[in-house]
Amino acid sequence: MEIKFRTKKLEKCFVESKHAVKDLGKDVARKYIQRVNLIKAANSFEEVERLPGLRCHELKGKRCGQYAVKLTGFYRLIFTLEGGMLNIVMIEEVSKHYDD
């Protein structure tokens, strides 16, 4: 699948692991890069949904139309699907699922 990033910061975190560790912390950064690579390697969204351990699911309410995959603990990778064949993944944000 094709990957796009909503912000330059998200793209930089993917491209430069050092930057990701600084912004997200070691564990979240490692999982962020890993998850983006898994999504990128998938041939379709259905394949992403079937990947074990990701817990890929559609969000509800104000976030309807967005999807999330688990990173670590409370952290989630939020993305949307674009393109005529829904073959473009727009990385929206890394979010703490339950803000304290």
Image (cartoon, grey):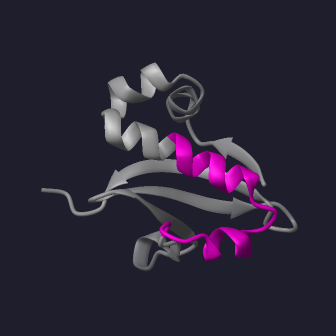
Q: Residue furthest left?
A: 100
Which quadrant would residue 66 be assigned to in this image?
bottom right
Q: Is residue 10 left or right of residue 70?
A: right
Q: Note whether 29 is above or below 69 in the view shown.
A: above
Q: Note whether 90 is above or below 12 in the view shown.
A: below
Q: Residue furthest front?
A: 52
Q: Nearer the viewer, residue 17 or 89?
A: 17
The residue positioned 69% from the left and 63% from the top of the image is 81
Highlighted magenta segment, given as a residue range: 33-54
Q: Position of residue 74 (x, y in %)?
A: 27, 59
Quadrant of the rendering where the C terminus is positioned: bottom left
Q: Position of residue 63 (x, y in %)?
A: 46, 69
Q: Nearer the viewer, residue 99 or 73?
A: 73
Q: Is residue 38 left or right of residue 76?
A: right
Quadrant of the rendering where the N terminus is positioned: bottom right
The residue positioned 54% from the left and 68% from the top of the image is 67
Q: Position of residue 76 (x, y in %)?
A: 40, 58
- Residue 49 part of the magenta segment: yes
- Residue 41 part of the magenta segment: yes
Q: Residue furthest right?
A: 84
The residue positioned 46% from the left and 48% from the top of the image is 93
Determine the main secondary structure of the stretch shown in magenta: helix
Q: Is residue 42 left or right of residue 100?
A: right
The residue positioned 41% from the left and 79% from the top of the image is 61
